[in-house]
Amino acid sequence: MKMIPLSKQSKKKQKQYHAQKRRTWDGISPVTRVAPDKKKYDRNREKQAARRADRAQE
């Protein structure tokens, strides 16, 4: 089979080629994920720290 440069191929073939190369999100939301701020007060994190401290004292 002869290799035809992409620029010489029809628009339909070019579109198929680029569609194959494109990746999918596979169930992952494309929204940017932000790490929680460690300096900000978090009630749940405080509870967990208190429980760990209580468990360590026992």
Image (spheres, rainbow, N blue to C red):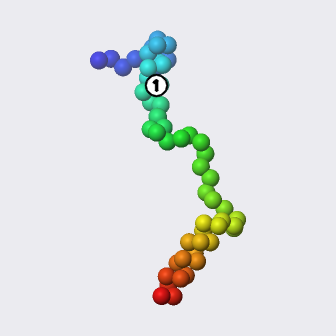
Could you say where residue 53 lies in the image, as x and y percent from the top left? 55, 82
> Disc 1 marks which amino acid?
Ala
Could you say where residue 31 lies in the image, as x and y percent from the top left? 59, 42
Question: Which residue ends up furthest to the right in the rendered image?
Answer: 40
Compared with residue 50, is residue 3 higher up or lower down, i.e. above or below?
A: above
Residue under the point 33% across and 17% down: 2
Residue 5 visible in the shown view: no
Compared with residue 31, is residue 18 higher up or lower down, i.e. above or below?
A: above
Q: Circle 1 sits in a helix, a strand or a loop, which is it? A: helix
Quadrant (top left/top right/bottom left/bottom right) for the N terminus = top left
Q: Is residue 28 left or right of residue 34?
A: left
Residue 34 visible in the shown view: yes
Residue under the point 60% across and 66% down: 44
Could you say where residue 18 lies in the image, as x and y percent from the top left? 47, 25
> 32 or 46, which lies in front?
46
Question: Circle 1: is it few (<14), some (14-19), or many (20+) Cα within 10 Å?
Answer: few
> In the rendered image, which residue does mark 1 sit on?
19
Compared with residue 9, is residue 41 higher up or lower down, i.e. above or below?
A: below
Compared with residue 11, is residue 38 higher up or lower down, i.e. above or below?
A: below
Residue under the point 59% across and 72% down: 47
Give the tally of numbered discs.
1
Quadrant in the rendering for residue 39: bottom right
> 30 or 5, which lies in front?
30
